[in-house]
């Protein structure tokens, strides 16, 4: 199955159908956080970086609310890279464990939780060390040139521990659209210094690849029924990126929202809701085989 079975003309027809659907699609709000937490993310330059580092495996809202919670534990000390670095990895791990005590998702077992705490606490301290030593304890100094293209922002972010391809691509999408707490806060702070932050190159944005994206694309095009292991995601990376460029050459990352929404809310691994899926008219090979079209 897949592209070799569909042929290019059928594949191209699906690209056009997909574009039409996306143009009229209103993305689902990915997560909601408290007003105080969001305000802190905008006002403190380190907060969105810590949140981004934490944003894997656990629900996104918990990752993005963690910086505000951490601030409350600092006994009025300044929330900065220097302050957090001085806490050291062991203490950050203890705090993170306490914060997540009643927030762990059910699919994360004891070993998964242990690995998460070890990795994220290490990455938080390492990132704070980088900011402290290379950027004079001020994350905004990473962006003081003002004008960038998307790939430059990508590599600025990739320098930080705990921010890989997926996270960097997600943040870039917000930056080129001029959205998100991190971008809004950064733009305001730089503006106060007489620097006009501008990120161009929507056409240069990759789509972040994760389990939802791979699952929906693969099923839609008849590549597989069961989602492959993460180790095999790289086999689909080039196809998905080029599909995104065909759908929206002016902004490939635009297709991320609908693929992520469909993967999370409709295209369940074992009990998909094909009859309600926004992409049913593409059409989807998986739904066709299940007799849902």
Image: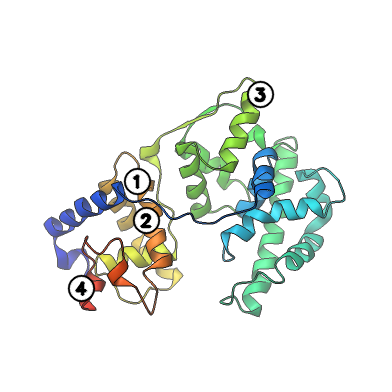
Question: Horizontal placement of 229 versus 78: left or right?
Answer: left
- State the colouring used for the structure image: rainbow
Q: Which residue is mark 3?
A: 192
In percent of the image, x 55 and y 28: which residue is there? 197
As measured in the structure, the alpha-carbon distance from the residue carrying label 3 to the one carrying label 2 is 36 Å
Q: Alpha carbon of mark 2 to alpha carbon of mark 1: how far?
A: 12 Å
Q: Which type of secondary structure does the marked residue at label 1 adopt?
A: helix
Q: Quadrant of residue 202?
A: top left
Task: State how far apart marks 3 and 4 are (Cα).
Answer: 55 Å
Q: Nearer the viewer, mark 3 or mark 1?
A: 3
Residue to which mark 4 is pinned: 288
Q: Report the residue that reaches farthest toward the right.
A: 75
Quarter in which the N terminus is drawn: bottom left
Q: In this rendering, would 189 be left or right of 87?
A: left
Which of the image's four quarters has the C terminus?
bottom left
Which residue is located at x 64 percent, y 71 percent? 104
Sooner in the amino-acid sequence: mark 3 or mark 4: 3
Percent x, y for residue 209? 43, 58
The answer to which quarter of the image holds residue 94 is bottom right
Q: Secondary structure at mark 4?
A: helix
Q: Front-most of 182 and 120?
A: 182
**What is the number of the mark on residue 258?**
2
């Amino acid at each position: 199955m897949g592209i070799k079975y569909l042929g290019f003309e059928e594949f191209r027809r699906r690209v056009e159908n997909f574009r039409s659907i996306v143009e009229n699609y209103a993305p689902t709000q990915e997560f909601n956080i408290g007003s105080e937490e969001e305000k802190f993310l905008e006002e403190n330059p380190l907060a969105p970086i810590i949140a981004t580092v934490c944003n894997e495996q656990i629900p996104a809202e918990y990752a993005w609310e963690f910086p505000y919670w951490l601030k409350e534990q600092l006994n009025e000390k300044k929330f900065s890279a220097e302050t957090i670095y001085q806490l050291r990895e062991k203490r950050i791990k203890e705090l993170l464990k306490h914060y997540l005590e009643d927030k762990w998702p059910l699919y994360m077992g004891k070993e998964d939780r242990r690995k998460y705490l070890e990795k994220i606490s290490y990455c938080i301290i390492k990132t704070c060390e980088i900011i402290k030593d290379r950027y004079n304890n001020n994350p905004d100094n990473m962006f003081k040139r003002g004008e960038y293209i998307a790939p430059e922002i990508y590599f600025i972010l990739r320098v930080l521990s705990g921010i890989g391809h997926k996270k960097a691509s997600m943040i870039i999408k917000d930056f080129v659209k001029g959205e998100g707490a991190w971008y809004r806060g950064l733009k305001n702070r730089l503006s106060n210094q007489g620097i006009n932050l501008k990120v161009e190159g929507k056409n240069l944005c990759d789509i972040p690849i994760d389990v939802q994206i791979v699952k929906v694309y693969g099923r839609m095009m008849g590549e597989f029924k069961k989602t492959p292991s993460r180790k095999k995601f790289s086999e689909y990376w080039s196809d998905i990126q080029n599909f995104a460029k065909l759908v929206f050459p002016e902004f490939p990352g635009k297709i991320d929202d609908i693929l992520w929404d469909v993967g999370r809310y409709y295209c369940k691994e074992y009990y998909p809701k094909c009859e309600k899926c926004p992409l049913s008219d593409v059409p989807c090979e998986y739904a066709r085989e299940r007799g849902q079209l």
